[in-house]
C-alpha cells in the first residue's frame, strides 16, 4: 500500500487564530499562538464577527495530516500538525477544551494556526488560559473522531440476546450483518461534553424500525436496506450519518451535559445491530488510532500503514449518502418506508 494514500477524511468547525486574541496578560494584543509561546492566565476573547468554518482534514496511512480538498479554511494539500490541547475558563460556566492545529507551508514554516473548540466558544467573553498540554491532544482528537454508541445501547449477540454495549468484553461473540458471528477485540469508553460537534444524536424508538431509542455520535453511519429507492440514491444498501437525519422530531440532537461514548472494535470494520438498527463499528485510521490503549496498538501492528484493523473500503457496506439527498423534512419517514416495502 502506498503510504501517501489518504485513508480517511474529517471536517471540524474551526477558527483562524486571528479570531481569538489575548485581551489581557503577557501576550496582550496577540492572536492565539503556538503552544510553546502561550502564557497561562492570559485572557483571550473571541471576536464578535467570528464564525466557525469547516476545516477539512485528510488523514494518511503514513500518519500525516493534511488540509483536505473539501475545506473552508487552510490551503488544500498543506501539512497539518496537532500542536496541543488547551483548556480555557470563561468568566462563568464550564471550561472549554481547544485543539490547536498548525498549517505548515512548503518550507515547513508556520502558515496558519487554527483552533478547534470541542465545545462552543462565545464572542466577547473573557476566556482565561488555564492549561496548555501537548501529550493529550492526539488522544482527545481520536476520542472525538471515533464513531461511538452510548452507554446502555443494546447490541445483538451471536445467540440473539441483547447486551448493553458497556458490558461487552474482548472475546464476546456478536452478530454482524456482513460477516456472521465475530469476536469483539476491544471495547473503549470516553466521557465528553455533549455540546456542539460532539453532541450525540437521538433516533427515537421506531423512527427507523428501531426497538428502542438509539443514541450515537453525530458521525456514526447507519445502514439502511432499501426495498424501494425512496430518496433517489440509486442503490439498495446505503449508509447515512446520524447528523444528516436530524429533523427536530424523530431524530434530534441531545445538546448539553456530558455523554458516555462507547467504542466497539473487531478485526475488521463491520455492521452490527444496535437496538435493531444496522450500524457501523469503530475503525482505525491515523486520527482515531490513538484512542486505543498503547499496548493494544503495539500488539496489533503499531502506527504504520498496515495497522489492524484496516480502513473500510468505499462501498464495502453500501453507498454513503450525503446531506444533499437527505435535506428534506420527510427523509426519515422515507427511509423507514423504503426498508419495509
Image (tube, helix red, strand yellow):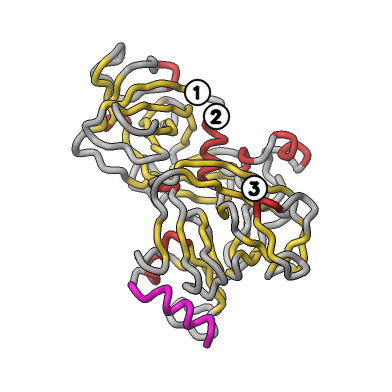
SS under mark 1: strand
Circle 3 residues within 10 Å: few <14, some 14–19, many ≥20: few
Circle 1 residues within 10 Å: few <14, some 14–19, many ≥20: some
Q: Which residue is drawn at 53% across and 72% down?
A: 238
Q: Name the residue under label 3.
A: 2
Q: Does 290 appear above or below 263?
A: above
Q: Do the residues labelled 2 and 1 touch (CB within 8 Å)?
A: yes
Q: Closer to the camera, 264 or 162?
A: 162
The answer to which image quadrant residue 28 occupies is top left
Q: Residue furthest top?
A: 26
Q: Which residue is drawn at 32% across and 37% down?
A: 121
Is 292 one of the magenta-colored residues?
no
Q: Position of residue 291 (x, y in %)?
A: 61, 40
SS under mark 3: loop
Magenta extent: 329-341
Is 333 one of the magenta-colored residues?
yes
SS under mark 2: helix
Say how many tags the image has.
3
Q: Name the residue under label 1.
A: 133
Q: Mark 2 points at which residue?
A: 136
Of labels 3 and 2, the one closer to you: 2
Q: Is residue 96 left or right of residue 219?
A: left
Using the image, tell me which numbered label, if any, was put on residue 195. none
Q: Where is residue 215 in the image (x, y as percent from the top left)?
A: 51, 58
Q: Where is residue 250 in the image (x, y as percent from the top left)?
A: 41, 69
Q: Does 31 appear above or below 241?
A: above
State how far apart marks 1 and 3 are (Cα).
33 Å
Answer whether residue 280 is visible to the viewer in this image: yes
Q: Which residue is drawn at 69% across and 60% down?
A: 163
Amino acid at each position: 500500500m502506498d503510504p501517501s494514500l489518504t485513508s480517511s477524511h474529517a471536517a471540524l468547525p474551526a477558527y483562524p487564530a486571528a479570531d481569538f486574541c489575548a485581551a489581557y496578560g503577557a501576550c496582550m494584543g496577540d492572536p492565539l499562538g503556538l503552544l510553546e509561546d502561550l502564557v497561562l492566565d492570559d485572557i483571550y476573547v473571541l471576536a464578535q464577527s467570528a464564525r466557525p468554518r469547516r476545516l477539512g482534514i485528510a488523514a494518511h496511512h503514513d500518519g500525516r495530516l493534511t488540509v483536505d480538498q473539501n475545506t473552508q479554511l487552510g490551503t488544500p494539500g498543506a501539512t497539518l500538525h496537532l500542536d496541543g490541547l488547551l483548556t480555557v475558563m470563561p468568566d462563568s460556566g464550564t471550561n472549554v477544551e481547544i485543539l490547536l492545529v498548525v498549517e505548515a507551508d512548503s518550507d515547513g514554516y508556520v502558515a496558519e494556526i487554527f483552533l478547534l473548540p470541542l465545545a462552543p466558544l462565545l464572542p466577547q467573553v473573557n476566556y482565561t488560559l488555564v492549561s496548555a498540554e501537548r501529550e493529550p491532544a492526539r488522544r482527545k482528537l481520536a476520542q472525538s473522531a471515533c464513531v461511538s454508541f452510548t452507554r446502555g445501547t443494546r447490541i445483538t449477540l451471536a445467540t440473539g440476546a441483547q447486551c448493553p454495549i458497556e458490558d461487552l468484553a474482548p472475546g464476546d461473540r456478536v452478530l454482524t450483518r456482513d460477516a456472521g458471528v465475530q469476536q469483539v477485540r476491544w471495547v473503549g469508553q470516553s466521557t465528553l461534553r455533549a455540546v456542539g460537534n460532539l453532541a450525540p444524536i437521538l433516533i427515537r424508538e421506531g423512527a427507523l424500525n428501531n426497538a428502542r431509542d438509539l443514541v450515537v455520535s453525530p458521525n456514526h453511519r447507519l445502514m439502511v436496506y432499501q426495498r424501494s429507492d425512496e430518496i433517489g440514491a440509486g442503490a439498495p444498501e446505503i449508509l447515512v450519518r446520524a447528523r444528516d437525519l436530524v429533523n427536530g422530531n424523530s431524530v434530534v440532537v441531545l445538546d448539553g451535559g456530558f455523554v458516555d461514548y462507547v467504542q466497539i472494535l473487531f478485526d475488521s470494520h463491520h455492521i452490527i445491530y444496535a437496538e435493531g438498527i444496522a450500524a457501523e463499528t469503530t475503525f482505525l485510521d491515523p486520527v482515531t488510532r490513538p484512542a486505543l490503549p498503547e499496548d493494544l496498538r503495539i500488539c496489533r501492528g503499531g502506527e504504520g500503514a498496515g495497522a489492524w484493523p484496516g480502513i473500510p473500503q468505499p462501498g464495502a457496506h453500501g453507498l454513503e449518502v450525503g446531506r444533499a439527498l437527505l435535506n428534506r423534512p420527510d427523509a426519515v419517514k422515507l427511509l423507514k418506508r423504503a426498508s419495509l416495502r
